[in-house]
Image (cartoon, rainbow, N blue to C red):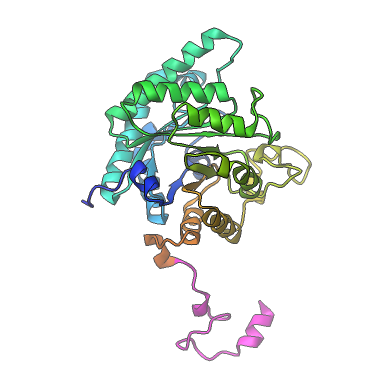
Amino acid sequence: MPPKPKGLLERLKAGETVVVAEGYLFEFERRGYLKAGAFVPEVVVEHPELVKGLYREFVHAGSDVVLAFTYYGHREKLRVIGRETDLEPMNRTALRLAREVADETGTLMAGNICNTTVFDPNVPSTREECITIFKEQIEWAVEEGADFIVAETYGMVAEAKLALECINKYAKGLPAVVCMTFHKDADRSVDGLSLLDSMRALEEAGATVVGLNCGRGPFTMLPLVERIMDKIKVPVAALPVPFRCDELRPTMQSLVNHKGERAFPMDLDAFLCSRSMIAEFGQRCRQLGLQYVGLCCGNASHFTRTLAESLGRTPPASKYSPDMSQHFAYGTDKKLHSLNTEKVVKLL
């Protein structure tokens, strides 16, 4: 077994960058083991071996963290699909498998809580519902050996702060990474706070890392990150979706397909970033000095490898990184047969 890895706080204090692979929901939907719509991680209890395999695959590709696949595995989401009895088994299985892979690979394991879909600041009873959701998932994560807790994809600062409040209360001192999603309006959270005020509120409430995840693509998220970096004292996170969003359509939910219809979620494939775009994102993160970087919904292992390599890493998967010098037509390797390369290339 590998030696115990440095903790999140230790890495951040040393100025290191932590690479985090996310995107389990979309990846398992693509593979045919998860239903788009509710997006509940049923695969955890139905095919746990596949979840463990994807954990390993993301580490192989360069992730420093095994993020337990408990996103949308909370009681409200399971209620919608009638699987409330699977709540604890689903969470504990995802966490246990993540801990096993982290121990095998010398990486960190993170528990994961997210937007509840029920929070309403104008309805006091929803606050108690959310506390119940957060508390049980956090306590299970602690019991199953999480190294830190990720709370993510909050549109409202009030819900993000409530999640952080619960981490501070129930996580027994574990660090908290808290990320929000800024939708079409880059200047305001859903509950009306500015981008900077949102991040400052989370920083002041005790988050170890604050930042943005999901929703926006690399090139519509980075400008927001750049606006806050020198104004926030704690490390800033950036985990975009790997889709080609732009100023007109800054989020994956705002993209439209060839018929002018909403592309989310079934027609997003046509908007996937190229690997060179992911490399460009990683290089910019490196220039900015971002310390918590990853990819969210739409991610796959080849994107994580590209991101890791753009940050100067050589993960195990780099053994199989492209080498076009060995290609029969475009290659330059002297061991290749001496074909009439120019003629072949013109035919391709």
Q: Residue furthest right?
A: 260
Residue at 50% from the left image edge and 23% from the top image edge: 161
- Say whether residue 156 is left or right of residue 318: right
- Where residue 196 appears, as percent x and y from the top left, is 61, 34
Quarter holding the C terminus?
bottom right
Q: State the image coordinates of residue 245 (x, y, percent, origin top left).
A: 68, 46
Image location (x, y in percent) of residue 225: 59, 44
**Residue 187: which quarter of the image?**
top right
Residue under the image location 46 percent in, 66 percent down: 321
Q: Report the number of numbered marks.
A: 0
Q: Is there any visible trace of residue 241 in the rendered image?
A: yes
Observer-nearest residue: 125 or 42?
125
Asked whether 167 or 199 is in front, the reply is: 199
Q: Nearer the viewer, residue 213 or 157?
A: 157
Q: Which residues are magenta?
A: 321-348
Residue 74 visible in the picture = no
Magenta stretch encompasses residue 42 = no
Q: Magenta segment: does it hold 346?
A: yes
Q: Considering only vertical position in the picture, is 321 above or below 216?
A: below
> For the stretch drawn in magenta, what is the main secondary structure?
loop
Q: Is residue 139 above or below residue 263?
A: above
Residue at the location (67% across, 40% down)? Answer: 251
